Structure formats: C-alpha cells, structure tokens
Image (cartoon, rainbow, N blue to C red):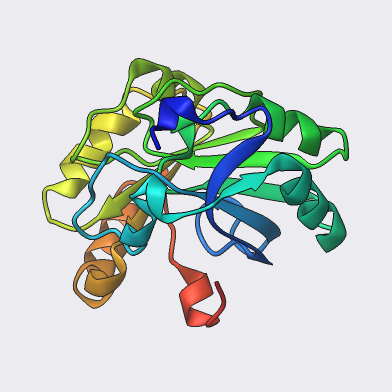
C-alpha cells in the first residue's frame, strides 16, 4: 500500500489512538485525544515510535470510527501526530471534528504541505529531512529536540525564521535528559524567549 493510494476522505492509517493528557509543549497538561497516524519518511534515529514508520504495518481506520471514538471521549481537543501526519490530506477528518466544535492540533516535522484547516501547528523540525518554507509560516509553536550540543545553534536558526508570535520550546531527548537539561536551563535563562518542554506524560506514566 502506498500513501498516495489511500482514500483519506473515508479512511486513514492509524497506529494508535487514545485519550490522555498532553505532556509536551504549549498545551502541556491539557486533556487531549491523540490520533497517531502511520507512515513516516523522516527517519529520526532517536524516535520513540519507530513502529509507526511503515504504513503497511497498521490498519486503515474509517473516519466514521475515529469521529465516534473522539466524540465519545467528551474531549474538546484532538492532536493529530505520527509518524508524519502531514503526509495525508487531513481535510475530511478535521472537518468532522470541527462539526463538534473540537479544537485540532498537529505535531509535524514540517516536511510536507499541510492539507486541512488546523487550529494549532506544532512544528518540530528534524535534521534528518529538511522542512518546507510553509512550516515556518504556519508554526504556532516551534519545538526543538535537544540531542546534541550543536542543536542550540540549530534551534536559533529555526527560531529566526518563524513568526514573532510563535511559541519557542526546547525539549531534551528523553534518553539524554539528565545530560542536557542543566544546559537547557542555563540557555533559557540567558535567552528567555525560549521555554522548556518536558515529556511530562512519561513522568506521569501515561500514554
């Protein structure tokens, strides 16, 4: 199955879906229904959901089913993540959610043109595949994963290209948090336009 062959007006490839608490970034602490789409060609070596990469390893789930699950949860906020969710035309899914006055966010590497009227665009660029210019224009939130000392300079480069209203976050890669968190704290104190994002859902032991 190829990504281009999927009829996104009726189905999407889904690795998992769950109702939880957003653990990262601007909406950290907010109840959120996550829809994790399968398929990704970015190839982050430290990705903690590498099982999402192969679209053929996951089922095609109907939008009818996803809509029902979201509405049943009573959430008012959905996060579409992946994988790389912008690989797909999300118009039909988002329109269904909007009918219920549900706010919709995306977490994306910015490597694909977004198709769908999203409310919140969390842009998390990766060194493994260059983002497109649209991502800088759409970004409400820039989230940089710190995995190497050079990532601070890399973060500033991306920050210089987003809108002045974009929220800026530095987040330590989970397995290197003890190493980099002190450095991130010092950096944010010297550069207060940045904020710190932590994967608080892992501390809470929730999805």
> Can you say whether 183 is above or below 65 in the image?
below
- The residue at the point 34 percent across, 54 percent down is 188
Q: Position of residue 167 (x, y in %)?
A: 50, 39
Q: Position of residue 177 (x, y in %)?
A: 28, 72
Give residue 74's quadrant in the image: bottom right
- The residue at the point 48 percent across, 80 percent down is 203
| Residue 73 in view here | yes
**Residue in the foreground of this view, choosing between 142 and 104:** 104
| Residue 192 in view here | no
Locate the N terminus and report the quarter of the image it occupies: top left
- The residue at the point 18 percent across, 48 percent down is 151
Q: Is residue 150 left or right of residue 171?
A: left
**Residue in the foreground of this view, choosing between 166 and 37:** 37
Q: Is residue 21 left or right of residue 169?
A: right
Give residue 72's quadrant in the image: bottom right
**Residue in the foreground of this view, choosing between 11 and 124:** 11
């Amino acid at each position: 199955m190829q990504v281009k062959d999927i009829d996104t007006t009726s189905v999407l490839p889904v690795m998992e879906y769950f109702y939880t608490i957003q653990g990262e970034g601007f909406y950290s602490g907010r109840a959120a229904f996550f829809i994790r789409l399968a398929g990704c060609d970015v190839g982050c070596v430290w990705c903690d959901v590498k099982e999402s990469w192969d679209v053929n390893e996951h089922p095609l789930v109907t939008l009818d089913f996803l809509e029902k699950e979201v509405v049943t949860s009573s959430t008012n906020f959905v996060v579409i993540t992946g994988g790389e969710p912008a690989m797909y035309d999300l118009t039909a899914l988002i329109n269904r959610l909007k009918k219920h006055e549900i706010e919709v966010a995306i977490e994306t590497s910015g490597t694909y043109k977004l198709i769908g009227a999203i409310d919140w665009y969390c842009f998390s660029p990766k060194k493994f595949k260059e983002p497109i210019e649209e991502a800088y224009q759409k970004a409400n939130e820039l989230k940089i994963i710190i995995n190497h000392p050079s990532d601070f300079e890399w973060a500033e480069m991306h920050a210089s290209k987003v809108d002045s209203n974009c929220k800026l976050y530095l987040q330590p890669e989970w397995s290197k948090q003890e190493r980099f968190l002190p450095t991130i704290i010092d950096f944010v104190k010297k550069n207060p336009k940045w904020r710190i994002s932590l994967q608080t859902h892992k501390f809470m032991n929730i999805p």
